[in-house]
Image: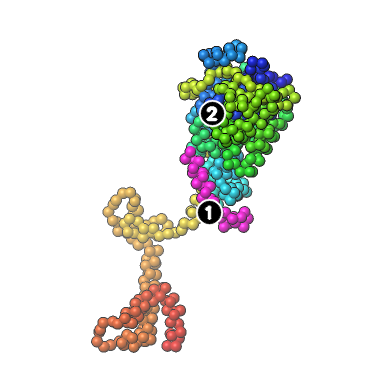
Amino acid sequence: MSKPLLIAKNQAQELHLLSDWANRHGCITGATGTGKTVTLQVMAQAFSDIGVPVFMADVKGDLSGMAHPGQSGPKIQQRCEQLGIAAPDWRPCPVTFWDVFGKQGHPVRATISDLGPLMLGRMLNLNDTQEGVLQLAFKIADDNGLLLLDSKDLRAMLQHLGDNASEFQTEYGNISAASIGAIQRGLLAISEQGGEQFFGEPMLNLDDMLQTDATGKGIVNILAADQLLQSPRLYSTFLLWMLSELYEHLPEVGDLDQPKMVFFFDEAHLLFDEAPKVLLQKIEQVVRLIRSKGVGVYFVTQNPLDIPDTVLGQLGNRVQHALRAYTPRDQKAVQAAAETFRPNPDLDTAQVISELGVGEALISFLDEKGRPTIVQRGFILPPASQIGAISPEERQQIMATSIVAGVYEKTIDRDSAYEKLKGRVASTQSQNQPQSAPATDHSGGIGDGWGNSGGTTVSSHTPTESVPTIPSQRQAQTQEQSQQQSQQQSQEEGGISDTLKSVFGNLLGGSGGIRRRDNVAETMVKSAVRTIGSQVGREIIRGVLGSILKKK
């Protein structure tokens, strides 16, 4: 049975959000400082009270106060008197804190494979070519059974592709070194922003967010996003990944009396800024279909025009706070926002939007038949929990008593692509090393090729006196072979020298006579004689002077 959730009130009526239509999504819009955060808090607590788990990003740190009961104050008393209602029943919400960086909440992680090339390419700001190379990296890793779990796995995989691009070219296509470099630089930038902690295991289990406490209230999962918001692409990609995970994880349930979970997407414009068409299509698909999984998605942003029309058309429950029309462009935005509501003949919506005070809003929820109600002007009710942040000590105490305390704090590093590729490279290097290289000890002895130096072994770290060594049988054979090769080389050089003398006898001046200074030609010939004595020289003389020697 549907439960009406009281969100706002005016002098004439109460404005309720019906629980059985809450999975038709919605939006909370308005300029900075007009009351969006309090509206978000009131709606989240209303869902929690009926047993619906909530996920919300805390971009300013104000929402942590939901863990403590609220208290009366002059402004709250004035609002209650203005609306003719009693003070709220001050009570806290059951809260679980999360943080990608693991400082202000339990760590939240996802694996590289689970994130996928599309979302990862969005996070790294890749173009189409670079994203294609990234997809190849995922494909080749899957084909070879290489797990991509954390950032070092992906970096190792990319390096492997770059070093062996020619081997993969015929089967998978060209792999550009420039594209691999761009992906590596993107990973480095994410790492410097602290996002590397997001990749890895243990990965977030979404069932841990779909919890209720002992009294049946839904857990309010608050993501600390004040630091995360400094990396807008990481922030938006993380929340989109969570939506996708919810869509894939939850079964089809159709229309329920109340949602299984409500997801608030604060600073939603970051999700759509410069998003490629394929990503916008994925967002639209998730928003449209996740309704059947019992999940309601509420976008929080300054202007409804920040949300694409294809997504905005899926949002049935709307709360519009004030917009300031200081410029002609702002005036057009106000007019466009007014046109998104079902008209009220008693209200000039466009004019009222710029006249609303703090905590006041234009509201249109779905009625019992799923139709948007005509827009109404009303005041948001004061929340029953604390408005404002709690202290770091209070946050740590709540984290210590959380139902997931100690589950995600310890990182798991399994054998994956990095370990396997690193082991493969080490194995290849060991196979390429010579098996019987001569070794020389510090005493001057020559090794026998089996790790023995032929004399006393001396540690490389301890200086000792030189010890005479006894040549082994193998060393003696080696020295004898060297002497024979030297004699043969001398004979060859002598024969070649005689031949040259007979060929260039006139240039050398014969074998006798008075010794005189060599001219240029003689110097060149003698230099050639010395060069020919080597192996390279012998090959040259056989090639260059072959015909002359034959005639000789």
Mark 1: few, some, or many residues within 10 Å (few <14, many ≥20)? some
Q: Name the residue under label 1.
A: 177
In space, the residues marked 2 and 1 are separated at their CA atoms by 45 Å
Q: Determine the residue positioned at 60% across, 47% down.
A: 135
Query: Tag 2: residue type?
Result: Thr
Residue 447 picture location, percent across and down: 38, 59
Q: Determine the residue positioned at 62% across, 41% down.
A: 279
Q: In which quarter of the image is residue 89?
A: top right
The kind of secondary structure the magenta stretch mainly shows is helix
Q: Name the residue under label 2.
A: 32
- Does the magenta run of residues contain 175? yes
Residue 89 visible from this viewpoint: no
Residue 504 picture location, percent across and down: 36, 86
Q: In this view, does 432 lie to the left or right of 505?
A: right
Q: Quadrant of residue 273?
A: top right
In this view, the residue in front, 310 or 1, is 310
Quadrant that contains the N terminus = top right
Read off the magenta span: 165-193
Disc 1, SS: helix
Q: Is residue 67 above or below residue 160?
A: above
Disc 2, SS: loop
Residue 432 picture location, percent across and down: 49, 57
Q: In this view, does 366 lie to the left or right of 461?
A: right
The extreme right residue here reads: 369
Task: Tell me the tag on residue 250.
Answer: none
Marked residue nearer the N-terminal end (2 or 1): 2
Number of callouts in the render?
2
